[in-house]
Image: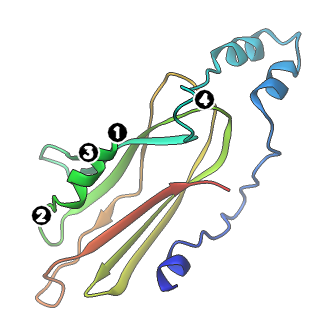
Amino acid sequence: MAEEEDFAPTQTTGYKVGEKKTIDEYKSLDANDESLNKWKASLASAPSNDKRRVVILQLALEVEGRDDVVLDLSSPEALQNVKNTPFVIKEGIDYRMKVKFKIQHEVVSGLKYLQIVKRKGIKVDKTEEMIGSYGPGDDHYEKKFMVEEAPSGIFARGHYEAKVSVGCK
């Protein structure tokens, strides 16, 4: 139950999720608007055997001066490998997370990134950031998040467990 509470999203100040519409509803809007028609033509749908609206392709840890630590999340097998592959970062370094994703089937509004970090079962950090609204298509999107500082000092050393959720209402 505590984990469900950890991942309960909060309201983002100043952001109002628009009315949900189907792709067909978007395609019928403002038929005389040339630029809007180009955007509507770019809306694509996904294979019918994949019901996901948001597909996370990779999550990466970006640290200045070194190669990114990239976690492949593009398939169930890759996701299982990530769960069994911890990585190490130096204490006190500045880092940022970034996510690469694609949208399928319908326009997604109010997409959020939520990260919970625990040490010995106790929550030590919660990061929540609005990603935005996106239409389905063949393009991949990448979102970089705020720079953070890794914990430092003798009491901060050890193993941490991070769980990430990317979703919308």
State the SS at label 4: loop
User: Distance between the Cα atoms at labels 4 and 2?
Assistant: 35 Å
Up/down of 67 relative to 15, above or below: above
Using a 10 Å C-alpha cutoff, classify the residue at mark 4 as few (fewer than 14 neighbours), some (14 to 19) or many (20 or more).
many
The kind of residue tagged 4 is Pro
- Which picture quadrant has residue 38? top right
Q: Position of residue 132 (x, y in %)?
A: 61, 46
- 101 or 148, which is in the foreground? 101
Asked if the residue at tag 2 contacts the one at tag 4, i.e. Cβ–Cβ closer than 8 Å, the answer is no
User: Which mark is on residue 74?
Assistant: 1
Asked if the residue at tag 3 contacts the one at tag 1, i.e. Cβ–Cβ closer than 8 Å, the answer is yes
What residue would you read off at disc 4?
136
Mark 4 or 2, closer to the camera: 4
Q: Position of residue 82 (x, y in %)?
A: 23, 54
Q: Is residue 29 left or right of residue 136?
A: right
User: Which mark is on residue 78?
Assistant: 3
Mark 2 or 1, closer to the camera: 1
User: Which mark is on residue 88?
Assistant: 2
User: Distance between the Cα atoms at labels 1 and 3?
Assistant: 6 Å
